[in-house]
Amino acid sequence: MTEAITIRRPDDWHLHLRDEDMLRGVLPHTARQFARAIVMPNLSPPVTTAQAAAAYRQRILKVLPQDLDFAPLMTCYLTDDTDPDDLARGYAEGVFTAAKLYPAGATTNSANGVTAIANIRRVLERMQEIGMVLCVHGEVTDPEIDIFDREAVFIERILAPLLREMPGLRVVLEHATTEQAVDYVLASGENVAATITPQHLHINRNAMLVGGMRPHAYCLPVPKREKHRLALRRAATSGSEKFFLGTDSAPHSQSAKESGCGCAGIFNAPHALESYLTVFDEEGALDRFEAFASENGPRFYRLPLNEGTVTLERAPTDVPETIDAAGTAVIPFHAGQRLGWRLRA
Ligand code: OTD
Ligand code: ZN
Ligand code: ZN
């Protein structure tokens, strides 16, 4: 049995770091494991300009512990009014790594998102021209569409037509949760990829609903049926370059989650690597973990691979019941469970 695995330093291609105290509380968990992360822009108010992104990056670096070497990669929150010139300038200057499409109302702090793709056509054309990556929250918001079908319907109604119109647009379908997403990405050109979260590899919708409502297993897109989880596990561990690590770690206070209208989001940052590696181990795919965690992402984003390595060893890791994020209690993914791998310090 493999007792330890050493891989090139990994990155997190989808992360929510928040701001102020919460930022200070959660950042070290990510920076301890990952060299870089795509930082999502859904603050309130959202990060919609290069100037706001540069300022947010400074706030992140200011609270980064000195002994941790970590680079935040910033994204632009697209709105109906995004200025293609500001976006292209921010990209050329290295402020933006990508732009994020939130259909208005699809997820946390997406109220200012895009109300119709037609409204950002010029922005997307410019992104296609300059090769800038579009990160997509792929769910429709049509109230007629069942929440469990929203990703599949988004692919059919929005993403597929968009990519037919702009076949060169570089797209990451974020946090894929369905077999349809996996199949679509596999059938698309090399300009289309997807991130996969640890929670969607570990849990299906039963985890949210059996034996009581489990707010800490609730995130968007919601975990789906077991067959979808199995499709995601096959995709992540297949060795395909189109799938890579993106935790979608999304911290909310315990009280905001345990509420009559609990917030969506799973805080998986503290043991993200151990959580993913457990899946690769269970699938007999330890040899494919490095590509998923450390190679496919930078290659897609056309960024250099990281230097240096991290080592995970087969040893019990007890995930705490609760984590103090600079004064706020946050319940981590796998709270109270024992994982079979440990990141060596
Ligand atoms: N999903 N929660 C959040 C974002 C993600 O859609 C997402 O990327 C959040 O709290 O920011 C969530 O459940
Ligand atoms: Zn999303
Ligand atoms: Zn997210």
Image: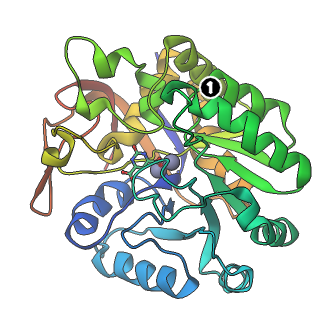
**Which residue occupies 39% across, 32% down?**
275
Examine the rendering and report whether any part of residue 241 can be seen. no
Which image quadrant for residue 193?
top right
Q: Position of residue 291 (x, y in %)?
A: 65, 40
Examine the rendering and report whether any part of residue 44 can be seen. yes
Q: Position of residue 214 (x, y in %)?
A: 23, 26
Task: Report the residue that reaches farthest toward the left.
Answer: 327
Relative to 262, 242 lies left or right:
right
Q: Nearer the viewer, residue 249 or 290?
A: 249
Q: Position of residue 308 (x, y in %)?
A: 53, 58
Q: Position of residue 172 (x, y in %)?
A: 68, 49
Residue type indicated by callout 1? Thr
**Which residue occupies 56% across, 55% down?**
102
Relative to 323, 308 lies left or right:
right
Q: Is residue 9 above or below residue 141?
A: below
Q: Is residue 37 above or below residue 196?
A: below
Question: Which residue, given by chain and number where applicable, does mark 1 sit on?
Answer: 237
Relative to 179, 325 lies left or right:
left
Q: How many marks?
A: 1
Q: Nearer the viewer, residue 247 or 44?
A: 44
Callout 1: few (<14), some (14-19), or many (20+) C-alpha neighbours within 10 Å? Answer: many
**Which residue occupies 53% across, 55% down?**
104
Q: Nearer the viewer, residue 60 or 116?
A: 116
**Which residue occupies 89% across, 56% down?**
168
Which image quadrant for residue 62?
bottom left
Q: Nearer the viewer, residue 138 or 6?
A: 138
